[in-house]
C-alpha cells in the first residue's frame, strides 16, 4: 500500500511540472485583410431571393414599410484557425418604398433592432 501511495505522489509531481498553462487569444480587433459593404439577401421558396424585406405581415406596395439591410463584411484571420473567415456586422437599415410585384419575406425582429 505505501508503494502505491509513493507512486501516485510521484506521478502527480511529474504531471504537475509538465503541464502547460493555457494561453488566451489576443484581444480583438483581429487583423483584417479587406472590408466591403454587402446588401443582405432574403430567401423565399416562392419568390426567390430579395435584397430587401418588409417589416409587417401585411404587404402594401408603395408603402414605406420595406428595408434594405447593408452589412459590413471583413475578411479576418482568427487565431487558432488555418483559414481566413468572413466577419459580418450590420452597418445600415435603409427604409425603402415596397415595390410592386411578389411579396418579399418579413424581416426578422433582430434585423430591425
Image (cartoon, rainbow, N blue to C red):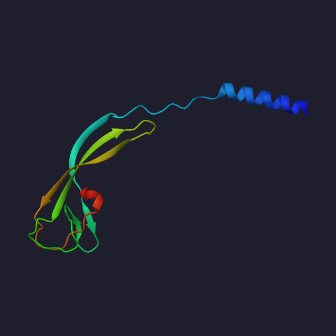
Locate residue 106, reporting x and y percent.
24, 68
User: Is residue 70 found left or right of 15 in the rendered image?
Assistant: left
Q: Relative to 113, is 53 above or below? A: below
Residue farthest left in this picture: 62
User: Is residue 43 found left or right of 17 in the rendered image?
Assistant: left
Q: Relative to 83, is 93 above or below? A: below
Q: Quadrant of residue 93?
A: bottom left
Residue farthest right in this picture: 1
Q: Residue at x 26, y 38 (%)?
A: 34
Locate residue 92, reporting x and y percent.
19, 50
- Could you say which is closer to the camera, residue 3 or residue 77? 3
Q: Residue at x 24, y 60 (%)?
A: 41
- Could you say which is closer to the camera, residue 11 or residue 49? 11
Residue farthest front in this picture: 113
User: Is residue 43 found left or right of 15 in the rendered image?
Assistant: left
Q: Residue at x 57, y 29 (%)?
A: 21
Residue farthest top in this picture: 17
Q: Residue at x 33, y 39 (%)?
A: 76
Q: State the quadrant of the C terminus.
A: bottom left
Amino acid at each position: 500500500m505505501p508503494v502505491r501511495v509513493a507512486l501516485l505522489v510521484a506521478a502527480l509531481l511529474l504531471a504537475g511540472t509538465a503541464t502547460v498553462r493555457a494561453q488566451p487569444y489576443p484581444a480583438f480587433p483581429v487583423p483584417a485583410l479587406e472590408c466591403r459593404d454587402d446588401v443582405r439577401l432574403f430567401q423565399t421558396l416562392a419568390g426567390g431571393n430579395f435584397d430587401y424585406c418588409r417589416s409587417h405581415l401585411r404587404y402594401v406596395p408603395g408603402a414605406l414599410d420595406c428595408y434594405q439591410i447593408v452589412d459590413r463584411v471583413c475578411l479576418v484571420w482568427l487565431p487558432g484557425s488555418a483559414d481566413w473567415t468572413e466577419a459580418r456586422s450590420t452597418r445600415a437599415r435603409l427604409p425603402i418604398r415596397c415595390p410592386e410585384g411578389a411579396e418579399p419575406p418579413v424581416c426578422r425582429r433582430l434585423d430591425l433592432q
